[in-house]
Amino acid sequence: MRFGFIVSKQVGNAVIRNTVRRRLKDACARQLPLRDGVDIVIRALPSAAEAPFVELLSDLGRAVDRGVR
């Protein structure tokens, strides 16, 4: 399983974009392992810069469940 991240300049400056990427990376690490050969690309919206971590986990979980089915 691999995760890829798209965090554009619309999210914020470089510091904010890297913070969002690190938070998403941590959220992905907490997800249950998926089957091999699954690649997931996550595009961060500007609201991700101010979203609480719990909300990121919840949104990511729903998206992964929907995408894997």
Image (cartoon, grey):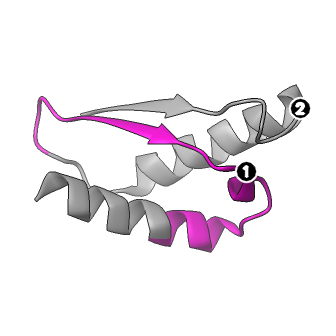
> Height in image: 1 above or below 69?
above
The stretch drawn in magenta includes residue 51: yes
Residue under label 2, please give it.
13
Question: Amino acid under label 1?
Answer: Pro
Residue 15's x, y, as percent? Answer: 87, 32
Which segment did they paint magenta? 35-58
In depth, the one of 41 and 19 nearer the eye is 41
Say what secondary structure mark 2 lies in: loop
Residue at 78% x, 30% y: name it. Answer: 9
Mark before the other along the chain sequence, 2 or 1? 2
Question: Amino acid under label 2?
Answer: Asn
Residue 64's x, y, as percent? Answer: 29, 56
Residue 38's x, y, as percent? Answer: 18, 35
Residue under label 1, please give it.
46
Instruction: Give neighbour class at mark 2: few <14, some 14-19, many 20+ (Cα, 10 Å).
Output: few
User: What quarter of the picture does the C terminus occupy?
Assistant: bottom left
Instruction: Give neighbour class at mark 1: few <14, some 14-19, many 20+ (Cα, 10 Å).
Output: some
- Horizontal placement of 4 versus 2: left or right? right
- Horizontal placement of 57 versus 67: left or right? right
> Height in image: 66 above or below 58?
above
Residue at 23% x, 49% y: name it. Answer: 33
Say what secondary structure mark 1 lies in: helix
> Height in image: 13 above or below 44?
above
Q: Quadrant of residue 25?
A: top right
Residue at 77% x, 53% y: name it. Answer: 49
Q: CA distance from mark 2 to mark 1?
A: 11 Å
- Horizontal placement of 13 versus 23: left or right? right
The dot on residue 61 is none
